Amino acid sequence: MNTLTNKKPPFEINEKIMTDVIEIAELVGRVSVSSKISSNPTLRRTNRIHTIYSSLAIEQNILDIDQVTAVIAGKRVIAPQKDIAEVQNAYEIYECMDSLDPYSSEDLLKAHGVMMKGLINEAGEFRSRPIGVVDGSGNVIHFGTLPQYVPGLIQELLDWTKTDNIHMLIKSCVFHCEFELIHPFADGNGRMGRLWHTLLLSKWNPLFAWLPIESIIHDNQSEYYNAINVSNNNGESTVFIEFMLSVIKQALSEADEVNTSRISPENKSYRRWKLISDFLKEHEFITNRDVQEILGVSSSTATRILSGFTKEGKIKRRRVKSYWRYTL
């Protein structure tokens, strides 16, 4: 994607994008009116923890949700110090997100300095060397912008994001995609791109500061990277915009489902546990996919449900290859 010769990033606003923007705007209005997030610090903290866990898990951080919760609570966790530091750093910068100017290059560098503190030598600095982005097999799938062009391109991108008149839902997606393709830092580009996307959306509507969009990205990680790669190959970010709008819509739909449900939280939990325990009476174990099917929820919601029942001691989990099995 060539941003060196064109200050306006290339993309198209198609019918699907416009439809999603309208539906998301309606969801934002509905969730903002009925949401308990603004008045419930426990819910805000839970969503923030899920956001940090998911964004770091995408970057191969090995801590599970319970360990991330413990680290944020200041408890001792037996795990690699690097992974613990990543959680501490991410929590620190997300907690002071309100003070950041989303159009400031200086604030972007400051945020990176906090996010990567003690993890890399160039924390809080644009990278000084060329860099290649590799996939899980070690294949180079994209070369970042040459380092001498990075500061200027990032400033152009920030200026465009600040001044262009298109809807913030679209602008934030374009910024996210272009940011990843420029790859301005030696490390931490993924988590910074997701942080800044959330920051931009939160300036449009404060609800987004507490909405765990990263959890949905984590559940669809391969699609996330594929959307970036396809956009790079196409020379414009339309595919990535479509993907991210679908993620935002899903996160809002889940929040709306919780807010508008006529079932009390206690009864909903009991009903869910009844279905899961009935399943386990007939099966040796249950998986995230099983919970999605029997409860009719998304993968991220199934993860939160299983995590909750694990904390309550109703089930225990065991890692089998690439997924978790849960047993009574």
Image: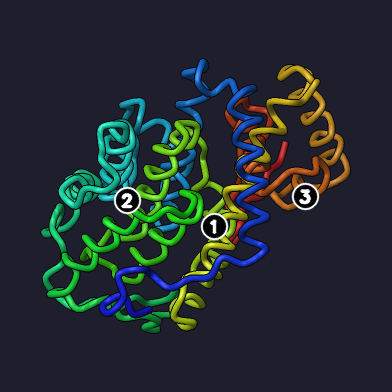
Element under label 3?
Answer: helix
Q: Which label sits on residue 290?
A: 3
From this viewpoint, is residue 118 visible?
no
- Give the residue at x 49% y 50%: 167
- Image-quadrant location for residue 235: bottom left
Element under label 1?
Answer: helix
Q: Which label sits on residue 162?
A: 2
Whichever of callouts 3 and 1 sits on the residue coming sooner in the sequence is: 1
Looking at the image, residue 307 sits to the left or right of residue 116; the answer is right
Q: Are marks 3 and 2 in contact (CB under 8 Å)?
A: no
Element under label 2?
Answer: helix
Q: What residue type is disc 2 on? A: Lys
Residue depth check, mark 3 versus mark 2: number of the one nearer the observer: 2
Label 3 Cα crowd, 10 Å radius (few <14 / some 14-19 / many 20+) = some
- Give the residue at x 67% y 46%: 23
Spatial CA distance of label 3 from label 2 is 44 Å
Q: Are marks 3 and 1 in contact (CB under 8 Å)?
A: no
- Give the residue at x 35% y 49%: 196
Above or below for 209 versus 36: below
Residue 57 pos. (x, y %): 44, 52
Residue 96 pos. (x, y %): 28, 32
Residue 291 pos. (x, y %): 75, 44
Residue 31 pos. (x, y %): 63, 30
Whichever of callouts 3 and 2 sits on the residue coming sooner in the sequence is: 2
Above or below for 74 versus 123: above
- Locate the N terminus and report the quarter of the image it occupies: bottom left
Whichever of callouts 2 and 1 sits on the residue coming sooner in the sequence is: 2
- Locate the C terminus and report the quarter of the image it occupies: top right
Total count of labels: 3
